[in-house]
Amino acid sequence: MASTLWCSSVSFAARLLMLSLSLLPGHARAAEMYPSKPVRMLVGFPPGGPTDITARIAAEHLSSALRQQVIVDNRPGAGGTLAATLLASAAPDGYTVSLCANGEMAIAPNLRDTLPYDPLRSFAPVSRIGASQLVLVVHPSVPARSVRDLVTLAKSKPGSINFASAGAGSTAHLAAELLKTMAGIEIVHVPYKGAGPALSELMGGQVQMLITGFSGALPHIKSGKLRALAVTGAARLATMPDLPTIGEAVTGYEVTSWYGIIAPAATSRTIVARLQREIAAMVRKPEVGEKLAGLGIEPEGNTSQEFAAQIKQEIAKWGKVIQVAGVPRQ
């Protein structure tokens, strides 16, 4: 008898739950069931660069955590803003997200007069995965083994050093422009469609210098195909303590990059919260932390509100850098 009553109560509770779900608006029901199909993660750069590699780490974890495949969709172009534009016009249902970085979220708004999106209004920040220093690398043929050597060489032969970037207005571009201004040197910008192509051209000797993420450059540094001169942060990396900072030669120089997950602005808070929890859980995993550390990324996994505040602060920061470097608006 007790068993029958228990089964009846469970059956009644289940029917009540189904009824309550049926009374929810369609978008609310969809949020409760999320995800019920694969999720697309847009990346604004080609495969091989730091943004792409970070995205693939996140996609692997989220695929397991969400029990749905998260597919990395590389949409390179315009310094990452092409992918951001696609995200801004995507359905706000949680099935299209993007791994964003400084370029499209904080630098582009300070450089471009007609962006098709507003970084503060077009997106729902989910969580910042982490921040990293960049590394200054040169082709082995360049007769410079330190930043001071490079500055001396550039001053002796103005315009003779070409520096690559992941695209006009990218973090790599602005980092080199800041060095150019602060060191008082004349070096020539050669933009590419992503860090991967820029690295390939540097290794081929078509350009002489690049400031980029550790993820793509580290294997080539270890193999001797590239020479690392310095890191861009305020302090040396614990994992590479012998590599100086640029600031040790050019006082006051400091640049870091960051990566985070964003969704279209009207995405359900329930979905955003779910994704945020999974990103926070991801960066706490020792094996993920090790992978990120290997890329020079310090894990964060902060809240959506904290990430939104950071984006606003970064826009102001890079606006000042662009003004100091004298980079013209596009």
Image: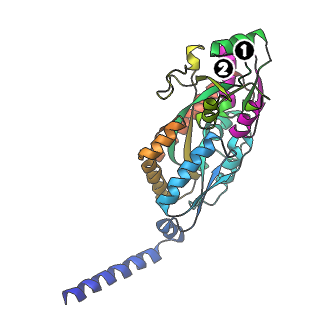
Q: Where is residue 293 in the image (x, y as percent from the top left)?
A: 49, 37
> Where does label 1 land, which residue?
185
**Relative to 143, residue 209 above or below:** below
**Relative to 30, residue 214 above or below:** above
Mark 1 residue element:
loop
**Cα distance between the residues tagged 2 and 1:** 8 Å
182 in magenta: yes
**Residue 107: which quarter of the image?**
top right
Q: Where is residue 298 in the image (x, y as percent from the top left)?
A: 48, 36
**Relative to 214, residue 99 above or below:** below
Left or right of residue 87: residue 127: left
Give the camera-side residue of 269 and 77.
77
The C terminus - image quarter: top right
Residue drawn at x 28%, y 85% is: 7
- The amino acid sitting under disc 2 is Leu
Q: Position of residue 306 (x, y in %)?
A: 46, 41
Give the camera-side residue of 124 and 48.
48
Q: Position of residue 211 (x, y in %)?
A: 66, 28
Magenta residues? Answer: 173-202
Please tell me the numbered disc located at residue 179.
2
Q: Is the magenta stretch mostly helix, strand or loop?
A: helix
Instruction: For the residues labelled 2 and 1, say whether their Cβ atoms are less than 8 Å apart.
Output: yes
- The amino acid sitting under disc 1 is Ile
Mark 2 residue element:
helix
Residue drawn at x 77%, y 32% is: 204
- Is residue 124 something that shows in the picture? no
The N terminus - image quarter: bottom left
**Relative to 67, residue 140 above or below:** above
Residue drawn at x 52%, y 37% is: 294
Mark 2 vs 1, N-terminal side: 2
- Is residue 103 something that shows in the picture? yes
Residue drawn at x 43%, y 52% is: 277
